[in-house]
């Protein structure tokens, strides 16, 4: 009988150890996934910030504020990304934004048009790439929260404590015992918090229509507001 008692005690210890090992292994996986999501978010925010010089160059190529206003209307960009930064730039700095863009055409108006279209083409491609990254982060966030929900349901401390108590024949699950308030506090601490993101945490990228959809309108605006 003593051998049986020893075997049962050893089994109880092994079960407790397995519960603890599984808990920390699952929590470690979630923490690593959370860190991976943070890296994806940082990469996205970095690329979003790098849109600034391109938008500033686009505004500089458009020239007049009236032209900028009209173009922003047809692009449905009411917030005008980085426009306030552009307004703070002196004329020489605005000109400097366009130095790397090759102006090709026989006329000044043609060179301006081609430069605007070239910048817009690059801007639209970068925004499209950012949208893909943004969607990837949102999908990762959803999957992470689903895993967190599974983790919290699988490792509910109150349930684990009740199971251990049952194994101990109704005794104290942890040496010294736990008061109800202490058990509730520990249960809260063991749970993994869901990850929530606001637009401030992860600003959506600007959404630009394809160049072919707005090319004619942009050309008309540049003709109406020559530089």
Image (spheres, rainbow, N blue to C red):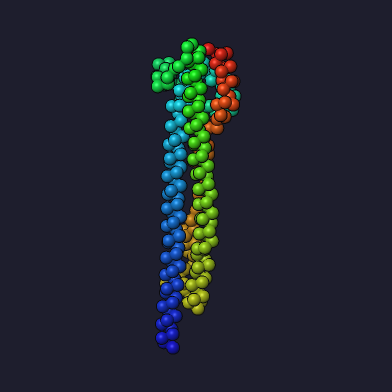
Q: In this view, does 78 lie to the left or right of 96?
A: right
| Residue sitting at x 42%, y 74% | 13
| Residue sitting at x 50%, y 27% | 121
| As drawn, 165 above or below 223 | below
Residue 99 position within the rendered picture, expressed as x and y whole percent measured from the top left: 40, 19
| As drawn, 135 above or below 145 | above
Which quarter of the rendered picture does the N terminus lie within? bottom left
Residue 78 position within the rendered picture, expressed as x and y whole percent measured from the top left: 57, 27
Residue 150 position within the rendered picture, expressed as x and y whole percent measured from the top left: 53, 59
Q: Residue 11 falls in which quadrant of the image?
A: bottom left
Q: Residue furthest bottom?
A: 1
Instruction: In this rendered view, identify the residue nearer to me: 184 or 130.
Output: 130
Instruction: In this rendered view, identify the residue nearer to me: 136 or 164.
Output: 136
| Residue sitting at x 45%, y 50% | 34
Residue 128 visible (yes or no): yes
| As drawn, 140 above or below 126 | below
| Residue sitting at x 42%, y 53% | 32
Q: Which residue lies furthest to the front in this view?
A: 106
């Amino acid at each position: 009988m003593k051998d049986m008692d020893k075997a049962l005690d050893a089994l109880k210890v092994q079960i407790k150890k397995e519960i603890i090992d599984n808990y920390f292994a699952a929590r470690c996986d979630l923490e690593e996934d959370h860190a991976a999501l943070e890296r994806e978010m940082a990469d996205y925010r970095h690329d979003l910030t790098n849109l600034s010089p391109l938008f500033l160059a686009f505004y500089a190529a458009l020239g007049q504020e009236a032209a900028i206003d009209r173009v922003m209307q047809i692009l449905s960009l009411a917030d005008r990304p980085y426009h306030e930064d552009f307004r703070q730039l002196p004329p020489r700095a605005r000109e400097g934004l366009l130095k790397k863009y090759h102006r090709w055409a026989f006329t000044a108006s043609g060179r301006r048009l081609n430069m605007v279209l070239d910048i817009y083409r690059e801007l639209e491609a970068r925004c499209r790439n950012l949208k893909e990254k943004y969607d990837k982060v949102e999908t990762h966030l959803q999957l992470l929260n689903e895993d967190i929900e599974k983790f919290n349901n699988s490792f509910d401390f109150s349930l684990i404590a009740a199971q251990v108590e049952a194994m101990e024949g109704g005794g104290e699950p942890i040496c010294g015992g736990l008061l109800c308030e202490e058990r509730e506090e520990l249960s809260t601490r063991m749970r993994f918090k869901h990850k929530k993101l606001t637009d401030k945490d992860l600003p959506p990228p600007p959404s630009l229509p394809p160049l072919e959809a707005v090319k004619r309108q942009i050309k008309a605006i540049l003709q109406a507001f020559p530089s």
